[in-house]
Image (tube, rainbow, N blue to C red):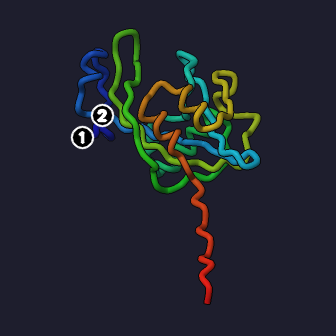
Amino acid sequence: MSIEGKSRPQMPLGEALAASDTATQVAGLCWRMSGRKLEVLLVTSRDTGRWIIPKGWPIKSLSHAQSALREAFEEAGVDGAAAKTRIGYYPYIKIMGEDCGIPCSVDVYPIKVKRLLDAFPEKGQRRRKWFPLEKAALKVDEPELAEMLRNFAPLRPTPEPSQEAS
């Protein structure tokens, strides 16, 4: 069950970990090809400095995919295009103080990065860095996000035409 659209109640961390109702957040899995290698962009969180993908609350006037793209711009200066369909989701507890949190389900949308802008709203508050998929998976704390990173394949190769003899 989702508590999207309702107030987002903070609760003691123990309760948040066991809660069945979750708030929905959106995130952008920002990617590029560097030569023949696929890389993803991670940013640091503002509070703990741990590596994450850009995420935040959905914006009412935007689709979830557009909201994810906006978060990627604000947190990392991403100029790119978001896929309209999510590739998955992962749970986490948004810490809201020393002993409180909000249980969240984060919908993840791939974003093909055209370029990184030098000026963006949270510049100076976060670091951003490109990682190969496996290394990125080792940097994030959420096991479901790590698995999503390990299995991410935005480009499906076109099958070779069969070479049957006539």
Would you say the residues marked 1 and 2 are in contact, meaning their CB atoms lie under 8 Å apart?
yes
Q: Residue at x 68, y 34 (%)?
A: 130
Could you say where residue 132 lies in the image, as x and y percent from the top left?
Answer: 64, 37
- Name the amino acid type tagged 2: Thr
Name the image quarter holding residue 95. top left
Q: Residues within 10 Å of mark 1 (few under 14, many from 20)?
A: few
Q: Which residue is mark 1?
A: 1
Could you say where residue 102 lies in the image, as x and y percent from the top left?
Answer: 34, 25
Q: CA distance from mark 1 to mark 2?
A: 7 Å
Is residue 97 visible in the rendered image? The answer is yes
Quadrant of the drawing holding the N terminus: top left
Q: 85 or 66, which is in the foreground?
A: 85
Disc ID at residue 22: 2
Direction from residue 95 to residue 138 in the image, left or right: right
Identify the mark nearer the N-term, 1 or 2: 1
Q: Residue at x 39, y 28 (%)?
A: 92
- Name the amino acid type tagged 1: Met
Could you say where residue 50 lies in the image, as x and y percent from the top left?
Answer: 55, 20
Q: Residue at x 40, y 36 (%)?
A: 90
Q: Residue at x 33, y 28 (%)?
A: 103
Quadrant of the drawing holding the C terminus: bottom right
Element assignment for label 2:
loop
Element assignment for label 1:
loop
Could you say where residue 5 lies in the image, as x and y percent from the top left?
Answer: 32, 40
Direction from residue 85 to residue 1 in the image, left or right: left
Direction from residue 105 to residue 65 in the image, left or right: right
Q: Is residue 64 above or below residue 130?
A: below
